[in-house]
Image (cartoon, rainbow, N blue to C red):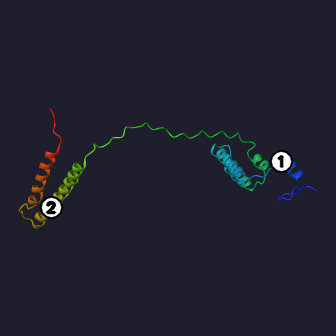
């Protein structure tokens, strides 16, 4: 007795089908490849819109590879797609900021805070002067100058000496 496969065909029948070129059942990948080839032929103006529509519908309805091959038999063979190679970028040197010690970092942060506070105070003073339409004593100088002078002296004293 011969073995039966889940398809209902015996081993002998399966071998017979496998020996017939194109008798193998087509899968979705086969159909997609055929539709892509038909689409390429349409884009290259080898097929009319009606032919494209008919062949695409037939490709999705095909059950064997022979049916798919018949749909593209009169088209030129598919040219292999050239591999996409990303352009290589030249290696650029990475600019690094000069290394600061913790004291220099602290002075830098304090200087930014001082500058921000000074700008806010000057902006408030300007708005008060413009809004009141009169000159007001520049009180922001008392907020900006003493800490700014202290930061300038500390920064100057902690810098490495410049040798000429």
Place of residue 140 in the rendered image (x, y in percent of width and height, measured from the top left): 10, 60
| Residue 121, image quadrant | bottom left
Place of residue 99 in the rendered image (x, y in percent of width and height, measured from the top left): 28, 44
Which residue is painted at 54% across and 39% down in the image?
A: 85
| Residue 21, image quadrant | top right
Which residue is painted at 10% across and 63% down in the image?
A: 129
Place of residue 102 in the rendered image (x, y in percent of width and height, measured from the top left): 24, 50
Report the quarter where the C terminus lies: top left
- Give the residue number, with chain letter if any, for mark 2: 121
Left-right relation of 56 to 100: right
Compared with 100, 123 (above or below) is: below
Mark 1 neighbour density, 10 Å: few (under 14) some (14–19) many (20 or more): few
The tag on residue 98 is none
Mark 1: secondary structure = helix
Left-right relation of 147 to 89: left
Left-right relation of 104 to 64: left
Q: Residue furthest bottom?
A: 132
Report the quarter where the N terminus lies: bottom right
How many numbered marks does the figure carry? 2
The answer to whether mark 2 and mark 1 are in CB contact below 8 A is no
Q: Residue furthest front?
A: 102
The tag on residue 18 is 1
User: What is the C-alpha distance between the residues marked 2 and 1?
Assistant: 88 Å
| Residue 115, image quadrant | bottom left
Mark 2: secondary structure = helix
Mark 2 neighbour density, 10 Å: few (under 14) some (14–19) many (20 or more): some
Place of residue 52 in the rendered image (x, y in percent of width and height, measured from the top left): 69, 50
Compare residues 129 and 119 and report the one nearer the observer: 119
Label located before the other in sequence (2 or 1): 1
Compare residues 144 and 32 and report the one nearer the observer: 144
Left-right relation of 55 to 144: right
Which residue is painted at 10% across and 52% down in the image?
A: 149
């Amino acid at each position: 007795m011969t073995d039966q496969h889940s398809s209902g065909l015996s081993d002998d029948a399966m071998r017979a089908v496998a020996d017939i070129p194109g008798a193998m059942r087509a899968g979705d990948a086969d159909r997609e490849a055929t539709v892509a080839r038909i689409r390429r032929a349409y884009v290259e103006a080898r097929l009319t819109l009606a032919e494209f529509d008919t062949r695409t519908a037939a490709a999705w309805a095909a059950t064997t590879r022979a049916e798919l091959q018949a749909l593209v038999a009169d088209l030129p063979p598919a040219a292999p797609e050239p591999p996409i190679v990303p352009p290589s970028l030249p290696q650029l040197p990475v600019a690094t900021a000069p290394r600061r010690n913790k004291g220099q970092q602290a002075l830098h942060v304090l200087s930014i805070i001082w500058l921000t506070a000074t700008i806010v105070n000057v902006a408030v003073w300007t708005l008060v002067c413009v809004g009141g339409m009169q000159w007001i004593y520049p009180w922001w100088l008392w907020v900006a100058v003493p800490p700014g002078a202290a930061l300038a002296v500390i920064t100057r004293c902690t810098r490495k000496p410049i040798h000429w």
